[in-house]
Amino acid sequence: MCLESLIPMAKHLSKEENQIHTLGTLLAAGEDKSWKVRLAFAKNFAAFADSFGKEITDNNLIQTFTLLLNDNEAEVKHAAITNISECLKNLSTEKICNLMLPTLQSAYADATAQFKAGAASSLCEMAQIIGKESTTQKVLPILNELLKDENSEVKLNVVSGLVKIANVVGVDLLVPSLLTTLANMTKDGQWRVRMGVFELIADLALIFGKDVYCKQLQSIFMGYLTNTAASVRQMGIAKSGALAAQFKQEWVMNEFVPVVTNHYNVDKKGYNYRMCCLNSLAAVMPYILKDQITQQVIPIFLKATKDDIPNVKFCVSKIINNTRQYIEPNVFNNQLVGPLKEMANDPDKDVSHFAQVALHTPA
């Protein structure tokens, strides 16, 4: 009998009929000598769980399935770990805590990177079912270890799942050891890992609020300003706008703008970082007053119009054009028109073009 044929068959049988006619065959397949048969069991386990129902899955099938998480064949183990998330709805909290988690604890340490990445995703899904206490005691220690793994996919899966953990554990997630690990990961050799961490920090800030962000997360997040990857800096700019929208004017002026302007004024590393600062200021302009823009933002824009690097000059022209609605008309006319006219005559074609666009676009 083809193993997959049990899926539609089980749906049409009662629990008692499945226990008599189909369950034995399925359990035997899960422990078959042929790894290909075990692989078929592992690959289709979520479908088996749906067909046989929660009671049979929780009482009978899961014991056999967990054996496959320690299978000698890597392909079987990977298929098993891939299916965990989809079958959780058919398991009791007791089975997850007392059977599934201990099995994962013993299986992940010496496993392949592919298995560890799957384990990270599965653990974050489990946390939403088993609650705060079990997550704190059993899931977080594993995730903290996986964050230190050498493989970038493993680390990314943990990072992407920590928002789910935060919704379960709350601010208690932010223990010093985790914050130290995340801070170190912002210097990871893989730019996707760095971006994942900065994105996570911003998302945690939106969950936990302004005070937690300022005390525990800000020093990590603002590192995006000088990250070497353009994609990371762009993501940081976008997240800064989201933070400003939630934290409002006082936070922008007291916590964000001073950090960005300081980075701009002391930057000695490269023009890309100055452009990141300019775009970061532009991202928060909708959330502050025009006179605050005049006092704190315009001076940086004016400095940028005198930059030695053409890219910085046409960047600030673009920003002035795109944020014109937030700038007082008399400030534009009295402070910005002069520098824009100078740049309109710049020998660099891009600088000249974008300055002329900014000058001639209606307010």
Image (tube, helix red, strand yellow):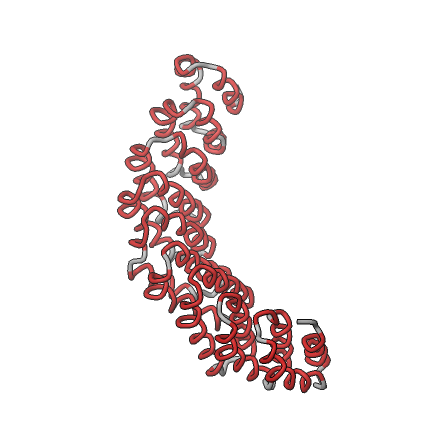
- Write down the quadrant of residue 282 in the picture: bottom right
The residue lying toward the viewer, choosing from 340 and 352, is: 340
- Write down the quadrant of residue 23 in the picture: top left
Q: Is residue 187 visible?
A: no
Which residue corresponds to the image point at 46% horizontal and 40% vertical from the top-left? 82
Which residue corresponds to the image point at 47% horizontal and 53% vertical from the top-left? 153
The residue lying toward the viewer, choosing from 252 and 110, is: 252
- Write down the quadrant of residue 183 in the picture: bottom left
Which residue corresponds to the image point at 67% horizontal and 87% vertical from the top-left? 342
- Please tell me whether residue 226 is drawn above or below residue 9 in the rendered image: below
> Is 195 displayed left or right of 108 in the figure?
right
Q: Is residue 351 visible?
A: yes
Q: Residue 11: horizontal and vertical position, in percent? A: 49, 19
Q: Residue 71: horizontal and vertical position, in percent? A: 40, 37
For the image, the number of numbered tags is 0
Which residue corresponds to the image point at 46% horizontal and 63% vertical from the top-left? 244
What is the residue that sits farthest to the front in this orientation?
330
Q: Residue 235: horizontal and vertical position, in percent? A: 52, 62
Q: Quadrant of the C terminus?
A: bottom right
- Please tell me whether residue 82 is drawn above or below residue 222 in the rendered image: above
Q: Residue 65: horizontal and vertical position, in percent? A: 39, 31
The residue lying toward the viewer, choosing from 40 and 133, is: 133
